[in-house]
Amino acid sequence: MVDLLFKYALISIAVFVSLYAGLLGLLTTSSFQAHVVYLHRIQMTWFKDLDVPESFGFLRNQVIPFSIKLPNGEALYAWHILPVELYRKHESALIAEPSGFVLDITSRLGFELLQNDPDARLILHFHGAAGTVGSGYRVPNYRALSAGQPRKIHVVTFDYRGFGRSNGTPSERGMILDALAVVDWAIKIAEIPPSRILIFGQSLGTAVSIAISEHFALQTPPVVFTGAVLVAPFVDVATLVATYRVAGLMPILSPFAKFPLLFDYLSSFIRDTWTSKDRFAEYARVNEAIGKKYRLTLIHAEDDYDIPSHHTQTVFWHAVNATIAGGISYEELEVKKSKLRTDLGAAGSVMEWRTDNGVIREEILKTGLHDVVMGNPVITMAVMRIFAAADPSFS
């Protein structure tokens, strides 16, 4: 009996090792790697129609499904979400409009309410891996984003190429081009100046967010948005796969993390590196150099089992380090944080690093998981804190 159990155990181990070896082999191919990193074929809309946002709990025509054109002729599927109090004021007129996907969003009342209000604010929303604009905790996230000022804060969210109804295949370069097209739409079509635009990103969306924030800060003249709120950022893909498990079970490269040479070799096959730590640093450095006001808020829950919260602490250090002539070590910053950090008890802790030009804020929450936090009041507060700092009359 013992021999039989031992035999089955060996067979099970052999099967697991074979599957894992097969996974590593497939991960060296760009197409399979894209599916693992982006999970873009996983819809998670549970047979609901994205062109019927009411099925996700929205009011009739509170959400306008539309598309944003790309330079290559393709289009990104998007939602424009109206703040609820603004909707209430114009409810009758909004209800009277046809519902569903619109070919020309500029013809809709909701767009006019955004474009023609000099006090309107726009949040550009960059979601994480897997799913669509209507998946999971993203719907309550949209409500949390506009809850602080439900008359003025509009949200535009979209699916990257290859996600949902957006055509194409995702890649780092392609998704950054997608994000640039969305910003271009906001500034040139909706005519909202960067000073009234806030960037929001979660998980993978934080990498896209900081990439475009850095891109625009490096332009001549530089373009800096009113701020960015980034939930569950990560250092880079190589660091992430050192701990990440597919579906929470199958490790990617974590078994090799203790063998640096082998880990570095396997990491060399990573196509899309998403080196966010370097982009955080460059974004802070450039804004300090040109004297532009900037605000970054990083939020992470300690019980996030997808991306550990130490990723936020690391990118926070990279950003802070870039603001100091001569730099500061991670250990030195930890000493300063121990003195300056605000302990919020069961709610977590907050650390703010202020310079003459910028505010870099780190919020480490006790709870919130990877996605649940997006619908919590901490998101509403982060948004309002940035908008109010930029314009104290906005309340």
Image: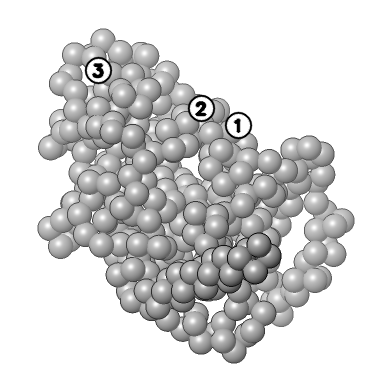
Q: Label 3 to label 2, Cα distance in Å?
A: 20 Å
Which one is in front, 91 or 1?
A: 1
Q: Tell me residue 240's x, y (percent).
A: 55, 66
How many labels, in total? 3
Asked if the residues shown at circle 1 and circle 2 are in contact, with their CB atoms under 8 angstroms apart, the answer is yes
For the residues carrying marks 1 and 3, which lies nearer the camera in this image? 1
What mark, if any, has residue 92 been given in the picture? none
Do we see residue 140 in this rendering?
Answer: yes
Q: Identify the residue position indicated by label 2 in the image.
A: 147
Q: Position of residue 280 (x, y in %)?
A: 55, 66
Q: Position of residue 50 (x, y in %)?
A: 26, 34
Q: Which numbered dot is residue 377? A: 1
Which sits earlier in the primary sequence, circle 3 or circle 2?
A: 3
- Of all residues, the one furthest to the bottom in this rendering is 261
Residue 272 lies in quadrant: bottom left
Residue type at mark 3 is Leu
**Residue that appears at 15% across and 62% down:** 72
255 vs 95, nearest the viewer = 255
